[in-house]
Amino acid sequence: MQPRHKTYKFDLPNIDGGYDLIRHIESLGFNRSSVNGFTGIQYSEINQWMHSMGLNLSAWEVETLFQLSSIHAEMSMKATDIDCPAPCKIESDEDRRKRITDEIFK
């Protein structure tokens, strides 16, 4: 019997671009520590980083870095809760129907 990580297949879309954004967010840093935990990287920090690295990113690339950082910070905060589901958890049809039914009949 093989370990699950060798046999499980994720149903993820093919990505044919954007790898440079992942390298950029790794270089920039995913988030910052704050008094209350983590916070996303601010536009001013992205601008300073671009200037120091000699990069000229487009507006949508800067926005994508900002959003990736904000989402990462939010998930980092939620992940401290023991009941936090994995962000890549695939919801079963039964779970989805139950969640939608519960939301409708609150």
Image (cartoon, rainbow, N blue to C red):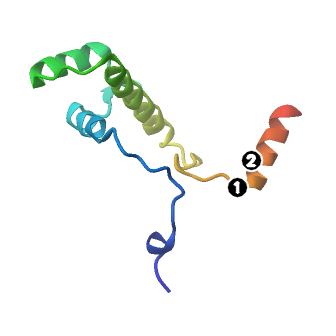
Q: Furthest-right residue in view?
A: 105
Label 2 Cα crowd, 10 Å radius (few <14 / some 14-19 / many 20+): few
The x and y percentages for residue 68 are 39, 31
| Residue 94 image position (x, y, % from top left) | 78, 54
Residue positioned 31% across, 28% down in the render:
33
Q: How many marks?
A: 2
Can you tell which quarter of the image residue 21 is in? Answer: top left
Position of 62 with respect to 91 (left or right) is left
Image height check: is 7 above or below 59? below
Pointer 1: residues within 10 angstroms few (<14), some, or many (20+)? few
Q: Residue 6 is drawn in which quadrant?
A: bottom left
Q: Position of residue 30 (x, y in %)?
A: 31, 34
Element at label 2: helix
Q: Is residue 102 above or below residue 46?
A: below
Residue furthest out toward the bottom: 1
Give the amino acid type for the residue marked by disc 1 in the picture.
Ser
The disc placed on residue 84 is none
Relative horizontal placement of residue 47, taking residue 37 as reference (left or right): left
Q: Amino acid at mark 2?
A: Arg
Q: Which residue is found at the position 45% from the left and 69% from the top?
A: 5
On the question of residue 16 being in view, the answer is yes
Task: Name above or below for residue 64 compared with residue 26.
Answer: above
How far apart in space, not on screen, are marks 2 and 1 (Cα)? 6 Å
Counting from the top left corner in percent of width and height, residue 102 is at: 83, 39
Residue for badge 1 = 92
Rendered image quadrant of residue 66: top left
Residue that appears at 51% across and 59% down: 10
Instruction: For residue 38, say whether it is visible.
Output: no
Q: Which mark is residue 96?
A: 2
Name the quadrant of the C terminus: top right
* 87, 19: nearer the viewer: 19
Along the line of sight, which residue is nearer the eye, 39 or 23?
A: 23
